[in-house]
Amino acid sequence: MKQISKALIVIFLFLINGFHGKAWNDDGHRLTALIAYQQMDEATRKMILDIIKHHPLYQEDFLQKMPSKIKTADQRIKDQWIISQMAVWSDITRQNPDYHHGTWHYINEAHFLTSADHRMKITANQKKNYQEEDDKASLNAAQAYHKNMSILQDPDQSKAQKAIALCWIFHIVGDIHQPLHATALFSRTKFPKGDRGGNSFYILREEKTLHAWWDALPGKGNSPFKKLKKTLKKLNHSEPHGNFDLNQTKSFSNWINESFELAKKEVYIESILEQAQQKTLNKYKSIELTFSKAALKDYRAKAKKVADKRVVESGFRLAKVLETIDG
């Protein structure tokens, strides 16, 4: 009974706080940024560190939030932390209406629960292109990416605006490599507006939504910087860049498609789809997932490999994107 009560509380919180979660936890986004830092050339690093100093909230959200151990470290460590902070700033500012844009974190490519559901009319914004007249309050991740890239490539934009845009690019590139930020599961009877990127599933054994469970695969979040650097070293050994295709570095649509295919194959596995069809929605319109201990262990092992590879891919690709920007 206690377990179910916790489940309902968490599901309720997700319902009142919007559709998608934070993509990777703090750790995943910081790791993406640190990998990009390793891969980008020195001129790009200097450009980024110069621009970010003009961020309207540089004092409050960067310098004042810098851990004391980082403040006393050498300049290179400080620079790495600043760049990692850029990758999480879009989550830090969620409570600030001047900077928060909830829909910029995801796009809902449609995956269908049954063959009959393919005939559904999908109202989600699935546009991949951006035009200046588009309402910025309803842009999806693809449109937001292109909007912020246009700001960075516009010589008439202020460095303050470019600093904000840079933070969004850091974050969106990480977001879109999380499969559940490129996908929603649709069903006429269960999820007519989509499952909110897995937030309408709750793993009882883990006391987390499916989305939050995937978010935590690169790390639980808020890890000390020293621990992040150790994780980074492991990733560098386990996922050398020869393991993935860097020829798609400039195609955001390709990254979306990759995540979408991974969601269909690796996230919405057969047992999850079967439970979605067989079980009824609870009062919060969610499906409560049950796994045996062995089944969940197997699912986690496979998912962890996917998540680690996506974090490394996003870091390499982010570095290539940043090198195209003329500060």
Image (cartoon, helix red, strand yellow):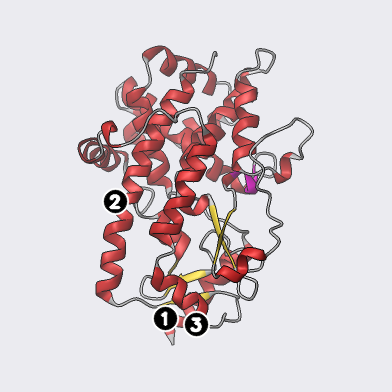
Which one is nearer the viewer's eye here, 198 or 83?
A: 198
Which one is nearer the viewer's eye here, 217 or 123?
A: 123
Q: Is residue 323 left or right of residue 113?
A: left
- Residue beneath disc 1: 3
Which one is earlier in the sequence, the residue at label 3 or at label 1?
Answer: 1
Which one is earlier in the sequence, the residue at label 1 or at label 2?
Answer: 1
Disc 1 crowd, CA 10 A, few/some/many (<14, 14-19, 20+): few
Residue 174, above or below 203:
above
Label 3 – label 1 distance at C-alpha: 21 Å
Circles 1 and 2, Cβ within 8 Å, touching? The answer is: no
Q: Which mark is residue 278?
A: 3
Q: Residue at x 33, y 56 (%)?
A: 303
Residue 122, above or below 170:
below
Residue 188, above or below 253:
below
Residue 193 visible to an observer of this rendering = no
Circles 2 and 3, Cβ within 8 Å, touching? The answer is: no
- Secondary structure at badge 2 equals helix
- Secondary structure at badge 1 equals helix
Range shown magenta: 100-104
- Residue beneath disc 2: 305
Label 2 – label 3 distance at C-alpha: 29 Å
Q: Quadrant of the C terminus?
A: top right
The dominant secondary structure in magenta is helix
Q: Is residue 133 left or right of residue 35?
A: right
Number of the front mark, 1 or 2: 2
Q: Residue at x 37, y 70 (%)?
A: 206
Number of the front mark, 3 or 1: 3
How many numbered callouts? 3
| Residue 133 found in image quarter | top right
Q: Quadrant of the N terminus?
A: bottom left
